[in-house]
Image (spheres, grey):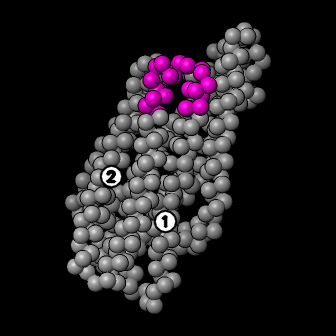
């Protein structure tokens, strides 16, 4: 049901919506700018290479970012006509995109860890079990939360708004989704750090050429992983703060700035650093191929359809 009011007391709320829309536009600009910066690498390392699961994941994550930003902005622009049905569609699209993107990034992380563990059969099974448990629970919790949440059109002083009503149960459910995702990322980081430390110790027994190559490979993996994890932790902390009742029900400038910052970091984490988890490794692989006299030396480090650390380990 559409809520209509010309009460001046709603003006601060209108101002806050407009203020948040600026942040959302900025988030979309960041994603588009990063795409422009990396389009050359993308053409060379993604489009011109043999297609694989990693290729599909990269393209989906990369190119869903801008439409996601547009959908996010539409709910906050006061000049766009939004019915109750459209408001609900926008909420569903935004929330389910977050869930799906998190799952896809989890698949990339499993492939990276499988590569780091040299094709171990036990580790992928362990990762898949945790991955499925976390993501199935997240889907169930998100579905329940979205069923309870109510979105409706509001016309305030002639401006169309998309209003959302969140009960405490909904806030708790969304918080649990983020907590589960954080648990998965912590597990993935701990496993990455442990195997990286182990391999750096083992490098002393290898020759200088092989040891240097594998060591550099692990440094590339860890650098992109730690940067991605740091951004995820920042997003999770801000999300949990924002979902607290005191913050969620406030229209203060500080809270709006918090939400705007959250949206920018969320876009960077999913649509900028996420694709770079694949792009950084392929870039390193391409540099090694270019500087190598023979392609046979590359059988140990590949992140195409199959990821190799040793000649027998594949994923």
- In the figure, is residue 24 to the left or right of 129? right
Residue 248 locus on image (x, y percent) = 51, 22
At 21% from the left and 60% from the top, the residue drawn is 122
At 33% from the left and 52% from the top, the residue drawn is 188
- Residue toward you, 280 or 212: 212
Is residue 101 visible to us here? yes
Report the disc number at residue 231: none
| SS at mark 2 in the image | helix
Q: In this view, does 188 lie above or below 305?
A: above
Q: In this view, does 246 lie above or below 305?
A: above
Where residue 301 sits, quadrant-wise, is bottom left
Is residue 84 visible to us here? no
At 31% from the left and 83% from the top, the residue drawn is 208
- Residue toward you, 293 or 314: 293
Q: Identify the residue position indicated by label 1 in the image.
A: 280
The secondary structure that most of the magenta stretch takes on is: helix
Residue 84 locus on image (x, y percent) = 63, 23
Give the Cα separation between the discs numbered 2 and 1.
18 Å
Report the disc number at residue 188: 2
Q: In this view, does 71 lie above or below 12?
A: below
Residue 253 magenta: yes
| SS at mark 1 in the image | helix
Please provide the residue range marked out in magenta.
239-258
* Quarter the C terminus occupies: bottom left
């Amino acid at each position: 049901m559409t809520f209509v009011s010309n009460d001046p007391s709603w003006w601060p709320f209108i101002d806050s919506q407009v203020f948040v829309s600026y942040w959302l536009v900025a988030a979309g600009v960041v994603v588009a700018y990063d795409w422009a910066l990396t389009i050359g690498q993308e053409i060379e390392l993604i489009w011109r290479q043999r297609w694989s699961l990693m290729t599909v994941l990269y393209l989906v994550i990369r190119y869903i970012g801008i439409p996601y930003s547009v959908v996010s902005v539409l709910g906050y622009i006061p000049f766009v006509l939004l019915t109750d049905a459209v408001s609900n569609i926008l909420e569903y699209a935004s929330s389910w995109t977050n869930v799906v993107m998190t799952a896809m990034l989890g698949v990339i992380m499993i492939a990276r860890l499988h590569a780091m563990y040299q094709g171990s059969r036990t580790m992928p099974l362990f990762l898949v079990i945790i991955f499925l448990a976390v993501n199935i629970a997240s889907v169930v919790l998100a579905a329940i939360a979205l069923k309870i949440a109510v979105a409706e059109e509001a016309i305030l002083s002639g401006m169309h708004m998309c209003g959302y009503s969140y009960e405490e149960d909904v806030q708790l459910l969304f918080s649990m989704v983020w907590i589960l995702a954080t648990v998965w990322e912590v597990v993935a980081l701990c496993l990455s750090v442990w195997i990286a430390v182990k391999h750096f110790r083992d490098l002393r027994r290898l020759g200088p050429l092989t040891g240097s190559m594998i060591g550099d490979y692990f440094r590339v993996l860890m650098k992109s992983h730690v940067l991605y994890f740091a951004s995820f932790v920042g997003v999770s902390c801000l999300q949990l703060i924002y979902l607290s009742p005191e913050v969620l029900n406030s229209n203060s400038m500080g809270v709006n700035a918090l939400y705007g910052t959250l949206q920018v970091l969320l876009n960077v984490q999913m649509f900028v650093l996420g694709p770079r988890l694949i792009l950084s490794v392929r870039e390193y692989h391409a540099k090694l191929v270019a500087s190598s006299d023979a392609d046979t030396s590359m059988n140990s480090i590949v992140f195409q359809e199959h990821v190799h650390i040793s000649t027998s380990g594949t994923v």
